[in-house]
Image: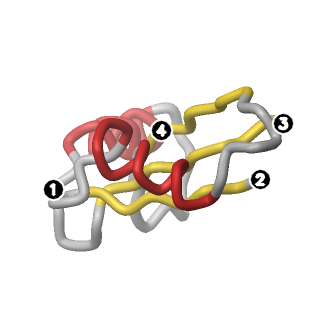
Amino acid sequence: MKVRIVVTLKPGVLDPQGKAIHKSLESLGFGGINDVRAGKVIELDVADSVTDEELDGMCRKLIANTVIENYRIER
């Protein structure tokens, strides 16, 4: 089964990568962009027997830094 984990910075955490993307888009002539936040997507191919609790544990222990990041698991 394919599982997608979306990791984003929590609100209020500085995002230098997002700022760089924002400035680059503006310099290329793209307007109307108020803010950019960069994140990451991790795709796992797991056995059907892997539980939501196990996926949550993977995220908390390794995939996301829960001090500054939020994550969402999509089955």
Q: Name above or below for residue 59 compared with residue 71.
A: above
**Numbered disc in front, either 4 or 3:** 3
Q: Amino acid at mark 4?
A: Lys
Mark closer to the chain start, 2 or 3: 3
- Judging depth in this view, the residue of 22 and 69 nearest the camera is 69
Q: What kind of element bears circle 3?
A: loop
Pick whichever of labels 4 and 1 is earlier in the sequence: 1
What percent of the width, then of the height, locates residue 38?
41, 45
Residue sticking out furthest to the bottom: 11
Q: Secondary structure at mark 4?
A: strand
Q: Observer-nearest residue: 45 or 38? A: 45
- Left or right: residue 58 compared with residue 2: left
Looking at the image, which residue is at 54% across and 49% down? 55
Q: Nearer the viewer, residue 66 or 14?
A: 66
User: Disc 2 vs disc 3: Cβ atoms closer than 8 Å?
Assistant: yes
10 Å crowding of disc 3: few (<14), some (14-19), many (20+): few
The dot on residue 1 is: 3
Label drawn at residue 73: none
Rounded to the nearest whole Å, what is the CA distance between mark 2 and mark 3? 8 Å
Task: Give the mark nearest the N terminus, 3 or 1.
Answer: 3
- At horizontal 37% and vertical 38% (from top left) the residue drawn is 63
In the rendered view, does 29 fall on the left or right side of 43?
A: left
User: What residue does disc 1 label?
Assistant: 14
Say which residue label 4 marks. 40
Q: Earlier in the sequence, mark 4 or mark 2?
A: 4
Amino acid at dot 2: Arg
**Disc 2/disc 1 C-alpha distance (Å):** 29 Å
Q: Residues within 10 Å of mark 2 (few under 14, many from 20)?
A: few
Percent of width and height locating residue 24: 39, 33
- Residue type, numbered disc 1: Leu
Question: What residue is disc 2 on?
Answer: 75
